[in-house]
Image: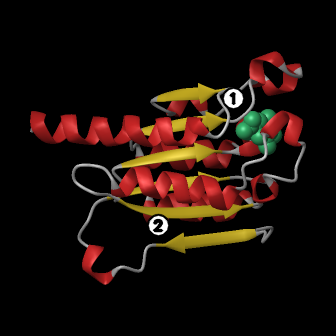
Amino acid sequence: MTDTHRHTEDDDPAGLDHPYLLLLNGPNLNLLGQREPGVYGQTTLAQIVAAVRGTASGGDPPHRLIDVQSNHEGDLVDAVHRHGPGAAGIVINPGALTHYGLSLRDALAAVARPTVEVHLSNVHARESFRHLSVIAPVTTGQIVGLGAIGYTLAATFLLNLAATMEVDV
Ligand code: DQA
């Protein structure tokens, strides 16, 4: 799947009342599977989205997944504005926008939802320009260097957090 702008939503009308997680992927992540597999692994983005959707639907209560990948920062800002406020949580791999995407950071700060930043590779063991995340200060936390499973771990955390908050209310 190498489209430059993907956007899928569950189209299960019966599920429209279900809460949802928002999954955002930034530039070049549409190329996962073919792109530097020694660094990013062989799992495709479609496989990652399917795994996160499975984790979300297995939550208690089941969550839908809204999934957006774009190579354009403004598209991701629009997705945060549109889908962020209603999301139980946001899983985001901003790609290279991690390191300079200030409008994406500001959008996440504006919606202020529980957010986990995921990186497939261990950015801290790589070039120094990858050590800084301008996104991290507006997230709940990061999962770095664990490969594709980092996405489902992030979703599991957000589902647990949502369940805990529900109980606390
Ligand atoms: C990445 C790390 C970024 O530095 C890079 O620009 C990416 C992928 C990761 O998942 O390891 O595109 O976010």
The answer to whether the residue bearing label 1 lies less than 8 angstroms from the nearest atom of ligand 1 is no
Image vertical order of residue 36 relative to residue 52, above or below: above
Pick the quarter of the image with the N terminus: bottom right
Nearer to us in this view, 21 or 32: 32
Q: Quadrant of residue 28?
A: bottom right
The circle drawn on residue 117 is: none
The x, y position of residue 164, in whole percent, is 20, 34
Nearer to us in this view, 169 or 55: 55
* Residue located at (69% from left, 56% from top): 45
Image vertical order of residue 140 relative to residue 7, above or below: above
**The disc labelled 2 sits on which kind of residue?**
Arg
Which quadrant contains ligand 1?
A: top right
* Residue located at (25% from left, 80% from top): 14
The circle drawn on residue 133 is: 1
The x, y position of residue 101, in whole percent, is 71, 43
* Residue located at (33% from left, 50% from top): 88
Image vertical order of residue 7 relative to residue 104, above or below: below
Q: Earlier in the sequence, mark 1 or mark 2?
A: 2
The x, y position of residue 49, in whole percent, is 57, 57
Side of 131 where 126 appears, left or right? right
Nearer to us in this view, 68 or 49: 49
Q: How was the colour assigned to the protein in this rendering?
A: secondary structure
Whether residue 16 is visible to the viewer of this picture, yes or no, is: no
Image vertical order of residue 169 relative to residue 30, above or below: above
CB atoms of marks 1 and 2 within 8 Å: no
Side of 10 where 125 appears, left or right? right
Q: Quadrant of residue 128?
A: top right
**The disc labelled 1 sits on which kind of residue?**
Ser
* Residue located at (19% from left, 37% from top): 165
The residue pinned by badge 2 equals: 82
Q: Secondary structure at mark 1?
A: loop
Q: How much space separates mark 1 and mark 2, taking CA atoms?
A: 23 Å
